[in-house]
Amino acid sequence: MRFNKETFVAGFALFSMFFGAGNLMLPPLLGLKAGESWSMVTLGFVISAVLIPILGIVAHARLQGTMLDFAKRVSPGFSLVYCVLVYLISITLPSPRTASVTHEMAIQPFFGTSAWLTSGIYFALVLLFVLNRSKILSLLGKFLSPILFIVILSIVALGVFGTLDPTLNPSTFETPVVTGLLEGYQTFDAIGAVVVGGVIIISLKIKGEENFERIRSLIISSGIVAGFGLFIIYAGMIYNGALFGAEVDPNISRIGLLSELSLKTLGNIGRSCLSVLVGLACFTTAVGIVTGTADFMKGILGESKKAYVITAIVGCILGVVMGQFDVHYIIDVAVPALMLIYPITIVLILLNAIPDNFTSDLTFKIVVIVTIIFSIPDFLASIGMGASVQPLLEALPLGKYSLAWLLPAVVTWIIINLFSLVKRKS
């Protein structure tokens, strides 16, 4: 690994693609409710919103293919279905959510315009960037991302160092680490890793970089840069939320709390800075999602440029339509989808990131099947069938924490590897 100008450009580009609407809204309210347990909540949040996503980037650096390669060792058919589901979820939930947040925080309070107008202009600009994808790394890495990072870091620093007598409220969470872990799902960062990691690799190859080892080193190094940036911002925003717990209404909304933090830390210019922040964070994420989806369709349709353009246009139209819904409605709708697809995504990331000696094709197949089976109760509970599956969730280890899949997947992986080890020795 090496860290140079190219590494930091790619790292900032990765950071900006990860850092979107949910990444801004979720940490402060999490900190507000966590209070004195903010560090434990941060630990859980960082696991699902930083560590696992960066392992996803490491896995991309090892594979250097498309997202289809993430699940192909389960089966080609499963890989195709998985990818279609991930991209469908991405362009119908997190991508439109970026436009909705931008409208509610950065446009509507100042101009009073309709959500249709905001979404229309917003996704027209997204489409412009996506159709000029060869310039994505330089535009995001050299210009937009550093501005975004500086504005967020200013809010964090002024909040942390400007509070002379911090008073932390008692935590409202029974299990802060688990709460932080599950809240990290809503950032979509693990899904983002398997989507935008491929965007970075393809962008590098378009720029003429072909050496496998050089690409691997660059991607891993840039992933570390992006991960460090995400960690600093998440921990800082969670701590800020905890610091201001005694000064705001405990029932304040996510967007309301973020606005309060910016006003308290940056004073009269806080609202304007927050508007820039929201617009940049959301926009760069939408660009990454739509580009990744268009790349995928182009790849499975014989590298068709027409497929890339049509997919980008359809993705932006969906963004305009879905972007009309309230932010909190989109968050609520996303829960069932995340309960089903996130455990599979986490398992695939981990299996692709660890050495091949511990991940045979059989391991991929059985561990993923077990993960799907034990994710179903959590999914059913999230769509209102909690009463039916409650006895099962209570019987399963970690079931009451919406993590019924975790131990079965880990135990399955251990058993298969022990069996393989015994077989090799005999």
Image (cartoon, helix red, strand yellow):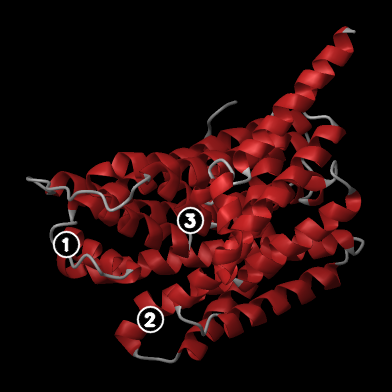
Label 2: which secondary element: helix
Q: Is residue 127 above or below residue 426?
A: below
* In-front residue for pair 276/392: 392
Image side of residue 334 versus residue 79, left or right? left
- Residue 393 x %, y %: 57, 51
The residue located at (28%, 43%) in the rendering is: 37
Q: What's the CA distance linking mark 3 and mark 2?
A: 19 Å
Disc on the earlier residue, 1 or 2: 2
Q: Is residue 40 above or below residue 98?
A: above
Label 1: which secondary element: helix
Task: Identify the image quadrant of the N terminus.
Answer: top right
Name the residue type under label 3. Phe
Residue tagged by mark 3?
A: 19
Name the residue type under label 1. Lys
Residue tagged by mark 2?
A: 107
Disc on the earlier residue, 1 or 3: 3
The residue located at (23%, 51%) in the rendering is: 242
Number of marks = 3
